[in-house]
Structure formats: C-alpha cells, structure tokens
Image (cartoon, rainbow, N blue to C red):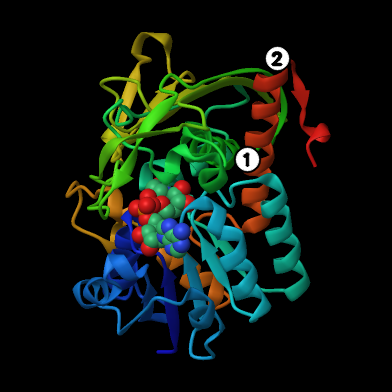
C-alpha cells in the first residue's frame, strides 16, 4: 500500500485529536494511502519529543519552517492558532505540498484569500477540518436533503453554544484578535455556517442583521504551560490584559434557495457545554441535529398521513446504511467526537489518492466562502446594517 509522510504543525487540543485520527485511520478504514506519522512540531516549552513518543510520531521538531520544506514530508497538517494558518499553509504550498488546515481557514479574510490563490496557482490539494460534516448523522442529513426528503427548505436554525469562558479563564490566544481573528464567531459560527451550507447545498446570499458582544472585557495574563482542553487549564496571574474578540455573535441570513436562517455562537451560554445543533424545516419534512446526541438525527416526515406524523429519532449507527459506520463497531455501538476526525483523515487520504470522498470535503476555496459569511456578519454587527454577500469579495 502506498504511504504518505505527514507533518503535524501544533500539538494542543487539535494536535491530540489529529494525532489520534492519523494513528487510527488505516486500522479502521481500507485507506488507499497509508499515513506515516513522520514529524510533529511543537514549541520548545511544550516538549514535542514527549508528545511524539506518546502519540506515535517518529520525530519531533521545534522549527516548523524547516519541517514544512523537508522533502520527506508529503502532507502538512496545520493545527495552530488561526493567525499561523496562512504562513504555514503558504510555506507548504510554496514547497508544492498538499495542506490540510484547521478551521476557520484563517484569522482574516485577506489571509484566507491569499491561501486560496496560492493553492490555485500551485495546483495543490487543500482541505479544511470542518469535522462535523463527518458525523454520520450530519452526513445522513446531507444525503436526505439531496434526495428531496424534506422538500424546499424554508427555515434554517443553527446554534453553537458553549459555556467554558467564565471570568476565571485567562487571556488565551482565543481572546486575542491578532491571534484568533474573532472569538466565538470564528470558532463556533464557522462550524455551523459550514455545516448548514453543506447540508442544504446552498450558499448564504445576505446577512440581514447581526449583534456581537464582549461581556468580559479584561482577563488575567496566563502563566505556565497549557495542560489541555479549550480553556487549556492555565492559570492567570494578577496582571490583566484586554479581550479584543467577541464572546457571542448572533446573525440572521438568507440562503440562495430562499430559506431564512438564524445563527448563534456563544461561549458563556451556561449549561450548554457543546451544543452544536441545527434544524431545517422544509415543505415535506424537517431535520434536527444536536452534537450532544451526535449519533442521532431527528426526522419529521410530513408526507405521512397526519395521524401518524411525529418526530422520529434515527440512530445513525447502522453500518449498511449510514456513512462511515461500517468501518467502526457493530450496530448501535455508538461513536464519539474523535471518530469525525478519523473519518475526515480517511476522506483526505482518498482525495489525495485521486478518489471521491464519502461526502464532499471542504477545500480552501470552500472554506473561504464560510470566511466571507463570517466577515459579512461582523460588518453587519459593527455597522448595524444588512450586508449583501456580493459586497464581501
Ligand atoms: N475542528 C474543531 O472542532 C476544532 C476544535 C478546536 C480548535 N480548532 C482549531 O484548531 C486550531 C488550534 O486550536 P487548539 O484548540 O488545538 O489550540 P491549542 O492552543 O490547544 O494548541 C495550539 C498549538 O499550536 C502551537 N502554537 C501555539 N502558538 C504558537 C505560536 N505562537 N507559534 C508556534 N506554534 C504555536 C502549539 O503547538 C500549540 O500546542 C485553531 O485554528 C482552532 O480554531 C478546531
């Protein structure tokens, strides 16, 4: 079986989830290309050698520029804070290498545009880790909408709510505009914009209005090394710094097929620990997904006689019928968060081998469309006005 040497740039939360995916994928899937976990990059204080030994990387590096250029590397996988996506991707593309990058594609629209143009000019394959597309329930929703099961979509309702960002969390990169680009917006709305574009097969044409708020305006400067998790387990000292991103962004939008939509991202939505969910209401039926019950898809079939209409819970765990599932466990032996990443690693390898992915996988161009929506809604919030998508190139 042909192999490809992977370099992983970053070793935090996503560094762990991608390491797990690269390590698992060829064990569970008949992959046309087998990934070799060649080298992981981490900052010196993170102890990349220990990370490499723990996760099965052959080598560790503290110099990403040299690593990305190395002729031994076949795929560059970027899991750094958002401001670094563009320089790392640019270097990978300049070296003629395919690049898979965490979401949002970049911290700014101009960085994202530059990444798209560089990839097009160099004709290299690119991927963005919008991993939720690869939950079997979300992939099934995509297939059902495409098959016309819910008819014409009238309403799209999407929320991604978390509650980890209390006052006690220090000023991590996630709260710094220069490093992150935006707050809950780029972190969470990016996912639900991508997921609803994917499932509906439509583009957003207009942002009708938006509101952004930063509730906690200062946070303590972090000390010590991150120990994991979104809040990274770091403590703050007495000194404080300014938060320069949003805690929450809500916006209203219109899709190209005529549906109206609402989106909400929040990091202080108490009690909603990772509520990543959407609901689509169509003329023939409706669908609901909530990541906190990620193995299930709710389906309302309005073509049935009225007497028996109601919400059905589909357990998306049947190997013969549900995307990706046949590669995991017997029916109803449910899967979790990490499986979406392994499913995505499989589809990346398929595309690199010249095959079709299981369901469409976003490249830089596709993720750029999501970034345009992020940008348009920030303009709408700042200027308190509707923004047509043509305005945002
Ligand atoms: N797909 C998802 O569901 C998902 C979930 C979380 C994060 N993300 C994305 O993944 C990326 C990384 O997020 P994370 O949660 O893993 O962050 P993290 O802080 O846990 O890890 C980031 C890693 O990047 C490297 N890094 C950090 N600052 C650096 C610097 N200044 N110079 C060089 N290297 C540096 C370090 O190795 C660090 O471990 C972000 O783009 C984020 O938006 C995606």
The reply, left or right, for residue 175 in relation to residue 320 is right
User: Which of the 4 image quarters holds residue 96?
Assistant: bottom right
Judging by the rendered image, the residue that carries numbered circle 2 is 384
Measuring 67% from the left and 49% from the top, which residue is drawn there? Answer: 368
Residue 288 in view (yes/no): no
Residue at the limit of the structure toward the front, as seen here: 239
Of residue 220 and residue 132, the one placed in the foreground of this image is 220
Judging by the rendered image, the residue that carries numbered circle 1 is 201
Residue 161 horizontal/vertical position (percent): 38, 27
Measuring 57% from the left and 42% from the top, which residue is drawn there? Answer: 181
Judged by depth in the image, the label closer to the viewer, 1 or 2, is: 2
Residue 66 horizontal/vertical position (percent): 52, 82
Residue 353 horizontal/vertical position (percent): 53, 78
Neighbor class of circle 1 (other Cα within 10 Å; few <14, some 14-19, many 20+) is some
Mark number displayed over residue 121? none
Ligand 1, seen in the image, is in the quarter at: bottom left
Q: Is residue 296 above or below residue 23?
A: above
Of residue 53 and residue 174, the one placed in the foreground of this image is 174
Residues at discs 1 and 2 in contact (Cβ within 8 Å) = no
- Secondary structure of residue under mark 1: loop
For the N terminus, give its image quadrant: bottom left
Of residue 26 and residue 359, the one placed in the foreground of this image is 26
- Secondary structure of residue under mark 2: loop
Residue 177 in view (yes/no): yes
Measuring 30% from the left and 85% from the top, which residue is drawn there? Answer: 58
């Amino acid at each position: 079986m042909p192999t490809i040497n992977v370099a992983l740039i970053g070793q935090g939360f996503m560094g762990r989830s991608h390491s797990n995916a690269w390590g698992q994928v060829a064990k569970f899937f008949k992959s046309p290309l087998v990934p070799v976990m060649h080298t992981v990059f981490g900052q010196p204080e993170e102890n990349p050698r220990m990370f490499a030994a723990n996760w099965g990387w052959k080598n560790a590096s503290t110099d990403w520029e040299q690593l990305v250029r190395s002729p031994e590397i076949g795929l560059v996988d970027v899991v750094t804070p958002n401001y670094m996506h563009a320089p790392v991707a640019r270097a990978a593309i300049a070296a003629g290498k395919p690049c898979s990058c965490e979401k949002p594609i970049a911290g700014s629209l101009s960085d994202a545009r530059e990444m798209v143009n560089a990839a097009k000019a160099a004709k290299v394959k690119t991927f963005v880790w919008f991993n939720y597309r690869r939950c079997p329930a979300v992939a099934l929703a995509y297939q059902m909408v495409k098959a016309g099961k819910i008819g014409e979509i009238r309403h799209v309702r999407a929320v991604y709510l978390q509650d980890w960002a209390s006052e006690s969390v220090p000023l991590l990169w996630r709260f710094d505009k220069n490093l992150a680009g935006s707050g809950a917006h780029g972190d969470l709305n990016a996912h639900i914009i991508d997921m609803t574009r994917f499932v509906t097969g439509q583009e957003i044409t207009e942002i009708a209005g938006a509101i952004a708020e930063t509730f906690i305006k200062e946070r303590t400067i972090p000390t010590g090394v991150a120990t994991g998790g979104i809040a990274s387990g770091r403590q703050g000292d007495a000194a404080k710094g300014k938060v320069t991103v949003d805690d929450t962004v809500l916006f209203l939008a219109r899709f190209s097929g005529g549906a109206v939509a609402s989106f909400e991202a929040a990091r202080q939505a108490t009690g909603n620990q990772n509520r990543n969910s959407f609901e689509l209401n169509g003329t023939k039926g409706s669908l609901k997904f909530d990541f906190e019950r990620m193995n299930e898809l709710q389906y309302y079939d309005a073509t049935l006689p009225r007497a028996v209409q109601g919400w059905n819970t589909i357990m998306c765990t049947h190997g013969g019928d549900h995307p990706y599932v046949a590669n995991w466990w017997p029916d109803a032996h449910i899967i979790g968060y990490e499986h979406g990443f392994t499913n995505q690693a499989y589809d990346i390898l398929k595309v690199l081998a010249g095959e079709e992915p299981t369901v469409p996988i976003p490249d830089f161009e596709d993720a750029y469309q999501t970034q345009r929506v992020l940008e348009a809604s920030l303009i709408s919030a700042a200027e308190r006005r509707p923004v047509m998508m043509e305005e945002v190139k």
